[in-house]
Amino acid sequence: MLNKKVMTITSSNKLSYRDAFMLIIKRDLTIAFRHRDDILNPIIFFIIVVTLFPLGIGPEASTLSRIAPGIIWVAALLSTLLSLDNLFKSDHNDGSLEQMLLSPHPVFILVLAKIIAHWLVTGLPLIFIAPILAVLLHLNENSYGALMLTLLLGTPVLSLLGAIGVALTVGIKKGGVLLSLLVLPLYIPVLIFATSAIDTSAMNLPYSGQLAIIAALFFASLTLAPFAVSAALKVSTN
Amino acid sequence: MWKWLHPYANPEVTYHFTGKILPWFVALTVITLSTGLVWALLFAPADYQQGDSFRIFYIHVPAASLSMGIYVGMAVAAFCSLIWQLKLADASAAAMAPVGAVFTAIALLTGSAWGKPMWGTWWIWDARLTSELILLFLYLGVIALHNAFEDKNLAGRAASILTLVGVINIPIIKYSVEWWNTLHQGSTVSKLGKPSMTIDMLWPFIFCFLGFALLVTTIICIRFRTEILARNSIRPWVRNLVILENK
């Protein structure tokens, strides 16, 4: 029903850019909440991966608190990667992606709306769960603020950069492994600066420098990634 | 002004043109690379601190700069193929990717072979080493994307987008030693006017660098030609070529 509305409305010229943007977000959120598994599975995966580390490394508090930032961030990367598949796949399969590309609205806006909706259902929950997992990993008390802030600025970057990879592989049948090969190298800078910020905060030093770099990555990818995504989608849908 | 360039958009013309210049590149490569390597490995003076192990640099530095250079070349080709839809630009990008990946791997391997006696470790998570490793992953991603599509034109366009996204890594590698100031030393050769190397060491280096650059050009040229043939295999001129070959 809502899908149909999107198709009919995006093909008319009367809709303002903001309305189109909000409509796509609303549609994607509705679809996501009707398939709750797609939201819950990456989160459960995130929790399970984090709990595997203390079991594998041993429950020593000093070791765990030393590696906690890295574990939480790597788990966040992997669970984002896992959830990326949903971003364009179903739309590509049922043809609504092509309708969006054909619509008179700039693809930039529609793509940005889809990525934001994706972040709202996959990135945002991680930020709320991370502090609880950080308690389990004995994260240094001074680091909670840094953990939350880096996740808040960093997970949107993961969604934005990941969208490029998904857009490139959406037309390929076995795109899953290829997707991780394409996307993970692009994630490395975020990982480096985020964990470095958390480590610095544990020593009670200012970490605004690393945070500023993550923010720069965020704004650069926010403005540039949708262009790459729309170009890639045009290649994939051909 | 650009008129002289237009004929080369035709695969047939480019194929014959590269066929004509290829022997020159082969000859130049053999001359410069053999002179450079023999001079560098046998006759150049040993370093007063590092002894003979510094000779690895005659391979390491050219490989590392060429790994970045090939990526930039690939990005220019990707840009041209996306903007002007040049099919030959796609073919050249596809020809460059594996060569670049191999040179990145050579740079990493020779670097760690030097790092073991000098830094006391095969590997260290230094900014330049890490960013060079990311470069290797980017090359592998581009190659994988080239192979993932049945349709070579689609593959070329998809890989072009990924290549352009990855360009951001090049300045990070180039300036990593200046920005982070970690273990990897700064550049010694390209300081304008005053290289911090003696002339005895510099000349063999110049020969080695030119030799490796020409080697890359030769390999890419050969790969580019086969790439053209593979993509145009149904065209009559390729068939005629095969018939001529078999006569």
Image (cartoon, grey):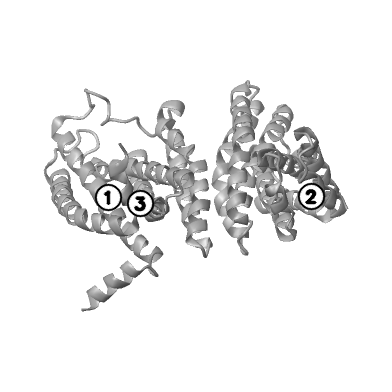
Where is mark 3, residue-wise? B9
Relative vertical location of residue A181 with respect to residue B76 in this rendering, above or below = below
Write the residue at 47% across / 41% down: B130
Q: Residues within 10 Å of mark 2 (few under 14, many from 20)?
A: some
> Farthest residue toward the bottom?
B247
Q: Residues within 10 Å of mark 1 (few under 14, many from 20)?
A: some
Residue B38 visible in the displayed image: yes
Q: Amino acid at mark 2?
A: Met
Looking at the rendering, in which quadrant would you find the C terminus of chain B?
bottom left
Write the residue at 73% across / 55% down: A91
Discs 3 and 1 share one subunit: yes
Q: Amino acid at mark 1?
A: Thr
Q: Amino acid at mark 3?
A: Ala
The residues bearing labels 3 and 1 have C-alpha atoms spaced at a distance of 19 Å
Find residue A24 and report its image quarter.
top right
Looking at the rendering, in which quadrant would you find the N terminus of chain B?
top left
The residues bearing labels 2 and 1 have C-alpha atoms spaced at a distance of 51 Å
Q: Nearer the viewer, residue B37 or A23?
A: A23
Task: Name the secondary structure under disc 2.
Answer: helix
Where is mark 2, residue-wise? A7
Q: Nearer the viewer, residue A204 or B23?
A: B23
Marks 2, 1: nearer the viewer: 2
